[in-house]
């Protein structure tokens, strides 16, 4: 099952005001490290190592919520089943609205599974609202993939294909460091994009860079950056 599971959005309940700090989560062979399938308010995940080796997704956000913070976490390894390391799947119909998401100062050194997915994904699921995610911020993250053509950040179109699932006016994404083996289809802003295409289409990442980062000793779990890092 899921390492941390919060359920109830079909018959909504509320989970609010808690912090998960300083954990290390390994393989979840069936589902996800964390699934938020409820109404979530003021939730913080920080200083956690997600050692992904299996499962559906790292985070599976399929409920609704306000003020979700993911800060100073480490994501490594592979999603072997279906989706991405951070997935907003919003599959609870038109009650799924996320307002206030902060993804800051995290390190993603990972690859997607054989069925696709990527690293960070904002998906509409079966939600038919034109805007599903508001006030989304991603800053100062290292986002590296190891599969050529893997999407590092994916923002899908809404169900009517009239715009992105995020509110573009409140989407703030900058000062990140990216790398993947191929420069083709590295990002998705409604359609697949190169890094330059992503910046133009989204209007974001003007201060971000594309540069591979090396860590002190990945095999020993030391993901401090080596001296001379550009990040």
Image: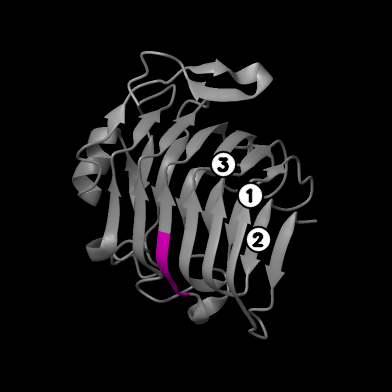
Residue 67 in picture, x, y percent from top left = 45, 68
Q: Which residues are magenta?
A: 97-101
Relative image position of residue 176 (x, y in whole percent): 33, 37
* Label number found at residue 116: 3
In the rendered image, is residue 54 in sight? yes
Q: CA distance from mark 3 to mark 2?
A: 19 Å
Q: 128 or 54: which is nearer to us?
A: 54
Between disc 1 and disc 2, the foreground one is 2
Is 51 left, or right, of 41 in this rendering? right
Q: Quadrant of the N terminus?
A: bottom right
Residue for badge 2: 35
Q: Secondary structure at mark 1?
A: loop
| Structural distance between the alpha carbons of marks 1 and 3 | 11 Å
Toward the viewer: 139 or 166?
A: 139
Q: Quadrant of residue 110?
A: top right
Counting from the top left corner in percent of width and height, residue 130 is at 35, 73
Q: Select label 3 or label 2 by which is in front.
A: 2
* Label 1 or label 3, whichever comes before in sequence order: 1
Circles 1 and 2, Cβ within 8 Å, touching? The answer is yes
């Amino acid at each position: 099952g899921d390492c941390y599971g919060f359920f109830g959005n079909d018959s909504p309940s509320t989970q609010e005001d808690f912090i998960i700090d300083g954990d290390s989560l390994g393989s979840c062979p069936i589902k996800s490290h964390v699934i938020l399938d409820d109404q979530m308010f003021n939730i913080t995940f920080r200083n956690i190592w997600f050692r992904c080796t299996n499962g559906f997704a790292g985070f599976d956000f399929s409920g609704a919520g306000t003020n979700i913070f993911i800060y100073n976490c480490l994501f490594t390894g592979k999603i072997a089943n279906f989706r991405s390391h951070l997935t907003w799947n919003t599959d609870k119909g038109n009650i799924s609205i996320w307002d206030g998401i902060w993804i800051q100062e995290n390190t993603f050194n990972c690859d997607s599974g054989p069925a696709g997915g990527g690293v960070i994904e904002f998906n509409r699921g079966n939600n038919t609202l034109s805007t599903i995610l508001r006030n989304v911020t991603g800053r100062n993250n290292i986002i590296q993939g190891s599969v050529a053509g893997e999407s590092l950040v994916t923002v899908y179109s809404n169900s009517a294909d009239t715009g992105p699932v995020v509110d573009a006016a409140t989407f703030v994404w900058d000062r990140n460091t990216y790398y993947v083996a191929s420069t083709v289809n590295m990002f998705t802003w409604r359609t697949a994009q190169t890094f330059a295409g992503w910046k133009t289409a989204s209007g974001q990442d003007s201060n971000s860079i594309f540069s591979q980062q090396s860590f002190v000793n990945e095999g020993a779990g030391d993901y401090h950056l080596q001296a001379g890092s550009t990040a």
